[in-house]
Amino acid sequence: MNHPLLSVRGLEVRFGVTRVLDDVGFDLQAGETLGLVGESGSGKSTLARAILRLAPAAAGRILWSGEDMLTWSAARLRRHRRHMQLIFQDPLASLNPRMSVADAIAEPLRIFGTGLSARDRRERVDAMLERVGLSAAVADRYPHEFSGGQCQRIGIARAMILRPRLLICDEPVSSLDVSIQGQIVNLLADLQHEWGTAMLFISHNLAVVRHLSHRVLVLYRGRLVEIAEVDTLFKSPVHPYTRALLAAVPDPRRIAAGARTPGDAASVAAAPDDGLGRAEATRGCAFRARCPTAGSVCESVVPPLEALAPGHMVACHVTRTGSLVYP
């Protein structure tokens, strides 16, 4: 029976009494790129850590090829970690300053007992450095000798040296110059195409998400509010928060024309705080205080994530009743 590579069902994560993720569920197919967007504090990085079992799940299931990872022993999880790798937001901070580039990239080969000799490991490291756009001649240098973009290439080489089945990228280009971001994004796309790695790509940069992703998840205050194919989401967003998020991206053509955003969505997205405490946000729709179309049902009933069309899921009471209308 064919299962998605990764399936998340009803995932809940709490830090003390604070619910950070609430009933999150989605599938990720082998070789697919799933974009994950949402404002700061929405739970994106926590979701990534929970998938890798670096943050404890309070409820739900995380299925790897149909098997629940939350039931695995520590030994079994360790054996499978070679198939799940992570690229961090800060490329320099993610590298050990006391380890040479060669040692950092070779470390996964040593940890997971690939049976390679020291010479074979070094040949693999040199080949990987060349693959990510660096020279094998820099292998004995240290992280402080490289730029941010070069350090991120080293981080990618370390993550991909085992050719994992799943790569989680947590804001991998946010700290880089714009001129370097495109190079790193294209490198990730090329490696994925070459090796068929599935990717969960977390970013605030919607243009990068649109370029890389097959589908997009929109997360707001720990809840998924919309899931859609990338073209559908960017051309026809449905949830009020998704519309606000996309409308907040500066559009020179819209500005030149003096056009209003749908429902003044940009001002909604720019609101610094919705005024709801964590306890209040768990009742009803978490976006209701910022939503221009919220009704009484939004105050008390959590909107379920339901299919609006094939491959397009939305969690919105107003959308489901067909009365979502913007001026």
Image (cartoon, grey):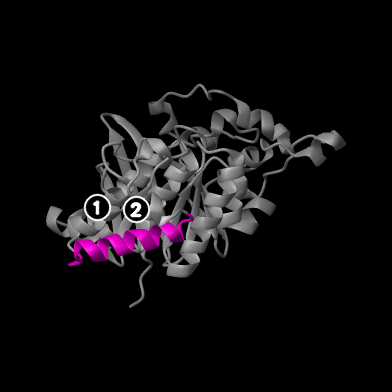
Residue 210 relative to residue 1: left or right: right
Numbered label attached to residue 158: 2
Name the main secondary structure of what is drawn in magenta: helix
- Mark 2 / mark 1, whichever is N-terminal: 1
| Residue 9 appearing in the image | no
Figure check: 253 above or below 153? above
- Residue 44: horizontal and vertical position, in percent? 43, 41
In percent of the image, x 49 and y 59: which residue is there? Answer: 33
Give the residue type at disc 2.
Arg
Q: Residue furthest bottom?
A: 1
Specify whether residue 29 is painted magenta. no
Q: In terms of secondary structure, where does tag 2 sit?
A: helix
| Residue 282 appearing in the image | yes
Q: In terms of secondary structure, where does tag 1 sit?
A: helix
Residue 202 relative to residue 6: left or right: right
Q: Quadrant of the C terminus?
A: top right
Q: Quadrant of the N terminus?
A: bottom left
Mark 2, other Cα within 10 Å: few <14 / some 14–19 / many ≥20:
many
In percent of the image, x 50 and y 32: which residue is there? Answer: 299
- Residue 291: horizontal and vertical position, in percent? 61, 33
In percent of the image, x 81 and y 34: which residue is there? Answer: 255
Report how far apart the C-alphas of labels 2 and 1 lie in the structure.
8 Å
Numbered label attached to residue 107: 1
